[in-house]
């Protein structure tokens, strides 16, 4: 069986500006995330960054990407709209997408959710306890009832997302807040998973449980079924599966164009 092809996209700015980030991710957060995925024999992860031409997300790269992971924070606005539209179309076709941590405010996640994606937050290096809501879900395999991350940023409710189609994790923080930290949706043929942990100044992507979740999630999000984007084809009456009589008026001509 061929390997699952993952592209790990990184904003790649904090790592070079802030010593507190470089400390944990000397080769970039995207490199650490890709290395974690590449521990699995069935996954082949490569990286792409904001600074590359077309942000590293050319038509060719996306065509050979089964699942794209996205980490962004301070430069969401620098991502070109035409690249966002290209990624969105690939998700509709069936490419999986993992939106990580502060990517809740990325253009691509907001476009796919169609809502504010707002939340509240606190940077205090506090304990996060990630509870498994759905132990039978493929993304929760290999985890216990919960796992803990000793130091994380807090994200709290309300989280401005559409009601998740599947809720896999809920986090509790030492300061008392809770958050829907693992949520899944489908858009078109594509599967989308939002996973909350991953603040840049903590070593979260080195955490064994977090690495397990990411491996599980890219496997879950792999494309299934045929590529499909609805371009609204017209089916004329004489091509209907059953014979029908045309009734009523129409502003369209015989070819389905507006007359
Ligand atoms: Zn953060």
Image: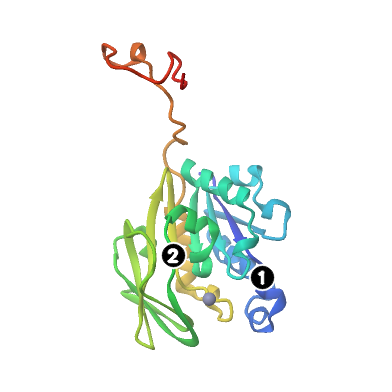
SS of the residue under disc 1 = loop
Visible residue check, residue 181: yes
In the image, which disc is placed on residue 197?
Answer: none
Q: Is residue 13 above or below residue 231?
A: below
Q: x and y percent of residue 58 in the render? A: 66, 46
Residue 162 lies, with reference to residue 120, above or below; the image says above
Element type at marker 2? loop
Residue 161 on image: x %, y %:
38, 62
Packing grade of label 1 (10 A; few <14, some 14-19, many >=20) is many
> Residue 180's spot in the image, x, y percent?
36, 70
- Mark 1–mark 2 Cα distance, whole angstroms, equals 26 Å
Residue 256 or residue 150, whichever sits in front: 256
Q: Nearer the viewer, residue 24 or 229?
A: 229
Using the rendered image of the protein, determine whether residue 142 is visible from the camera's viewpoint.
no
* Residue lying at 32% horizontally and 60% vertically, measured from the top left: 163
User: Is the residue at mark 2 in contact range of ligand 1, meaning its CB lies under 8 Å from it?
Assistant: no
Answer with left or right where residue 15 lies relative to residue 183. Answer: right
Q: Nearer the viewer, residue 108 or 142?
A: 108
Res. 25 image quadrant: bottom right
Please identify, in this view, whether the residue under mark 1 or under mark 2 is nearer the observer.
2
Quick one: label 1 or label 2, which is nearer the N terminus? 1
Tell me the residue at 64%/46% (across/down).
61
Identify the disc placed on residue 117.
2
The residue that label 1 is drawn on is 28
């Amino acid at each position: 069986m061929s390997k699952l092809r993952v592209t790990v996209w990184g904003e790649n700015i904090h790592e070079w500006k802030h010593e507190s980030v470089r400390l944990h991710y000397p080769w970039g957060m995207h490199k650490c995330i890709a290395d974690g995925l590449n521990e699995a024999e069935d996954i082949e992860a490569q990286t792409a960054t904001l600074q590359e031409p077309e942000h590293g997300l050319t038509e060719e790269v996306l065509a050979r990407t089964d699942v794209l992971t996205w980490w962004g924070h301070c430069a969401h606005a620098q991502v070109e709209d035409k690249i966002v539209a290209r990624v969105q179309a690939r998700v509709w076709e069936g490419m999986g997408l993992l939106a990580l941590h502060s990517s809740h405010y990325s253009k691509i996640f907001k476009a796919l959710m169609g809502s504010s994606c707002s939340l509240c937050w606190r940077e205090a290096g506090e304990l996060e306890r990630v509870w498994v809501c759905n132990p039978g879900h493929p993304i929760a395999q290999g985890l216990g009832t919960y796992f803990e991350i000793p130091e994380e940023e807090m994200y709290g409710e309300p989280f401005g997302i559409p009601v998740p189609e599947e809720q896999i994790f809920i986090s509790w923080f030492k300061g008392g807040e809770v958050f829907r930290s693992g949520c899944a949706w489908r858009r078109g043929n594509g599967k989308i998973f939002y996973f909350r942990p991953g603040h840049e100044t903590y070593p979260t992507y080195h955490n064994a449980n977090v690495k397990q979740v990411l491996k599980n999630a890219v496997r879950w999000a792999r494309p299934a079924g045929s590529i499909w984007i609805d371009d609204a084809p017209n089916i004329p009456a004489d091509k209907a599966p059953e014979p029908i009589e045309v009734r009523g008026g129409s502003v369209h001509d015989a070819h389905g164009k507006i007359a």
